[in-house]
Image (tube, rainbow, N blue to C red):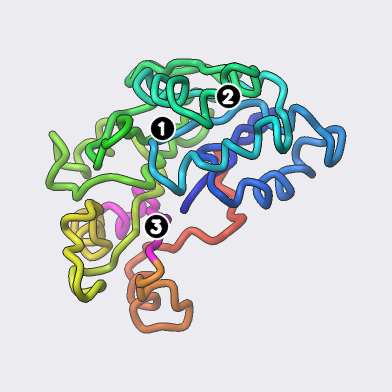
Amino acid sequence: MASLALVAGDRVFLVDATPDIRRQLDRLRDLKPGEGRVDRSPLDGVFLTHAHLGHYTGLGFLGFEAVHANETPLYATARMVDYLATNGPWSQLVDLRNVVPEKLTPGEPLAIDERVRVTAHLVPHRDEFADTVGFLFAGPDRRVFYVPDTDGWQHWDAPFEAWLDEQRVDVAIVDGSFYSMDELPGRDVAAIGHPLIIDTVERLKERVGSGGLQVFFTHFNHSNPVLDADGTLRAELESAGFRVLDDGMEIGL
């Protein structure tokens, strides 16, 4: 599971609604003070990357049995919106207007305010129920690309490093699910569909080493050895200039 909060002035948006959404809302309460534990509008909106377990199932806690949110904007692609609107229990959120779907067009920026824009970009992944996007957050000082889930970089139409250059990305927060191919005995890591950390490092090491790009890894499988903060592989990763995205870390735009 992985998620971000986007804070723009006094507005707070959640990027992906994980099964831990209750904890997420607790942590965001200081940033968006409201009516405490009976607040019907704890968020100014939710952005969704795709329809896999750890990224949208927390929406249920915005529904009638829990927060019973009041018209929370829900930003997603047309395919993702259609999936939610036509399948229970998610369709009840739409019917009761706990969430109000706002369809995103990939490649078209959405202005959050006069300083921050969000653009969805389609990425290849296991799209069983809906398509998958990463989000480019453009602020006055930096451009941050968030892609917690994607197939390996070899499946992109253009080399990932070239795409980052084209989009003038300053900070990339990327899928770090697996470190290497031998991580899950009895399962084919390649079939699960994620880039390997060792491949990402190889592609981006020159840009990171020159200081032109910051790279943070997120969305770790429980088997990933870089989760050991005192381990050798974490030390090697950090010595090369790459970082593990820590819980609660703040990155300015």
Judge by depth and name the residue closer to the eye, 91 or 140: 91
User: Along the polypeptide, which appears first: circle 3 or circle 2?
Assistant: 2
Visible in this render: residue 239?
A: no
Furthest residue in direction front, as rendered: 88
**Which amino acid type is shown beneath numbered disc 3?**
Phe
Which image quarter: residue 109? Answer: top left
User: Along the polypeptide, which appears first: circle 1 or circle 2?
Assistant: 2
Task: State which quarter of the image contains the C terminus.
Answer: top right
Q: In the rendered structure, which segment of residues is drawn in magenta?
A: 205-221
Question: Which residue is label 1 attached to?
Answer: 136
Visible in this render: residue 17?
A: yes
Mark 3 and mark 2: Cα distance apart in space? 34 Å
**Which amino acid type is shown beneath numbered disc 2?**
Gln
Question: Which residue is label 2 attached to?
Answer: 92
Q: Residues within 10 Å of mark 1 (few under 14, many from 20)?
A: many
**Which amino acid type is shown beneath numbered disc 1?**
Leu
Secondary element under disc 3, as helix, strand or loop, is strand
Q: Which mark is residue 217?
A: 3
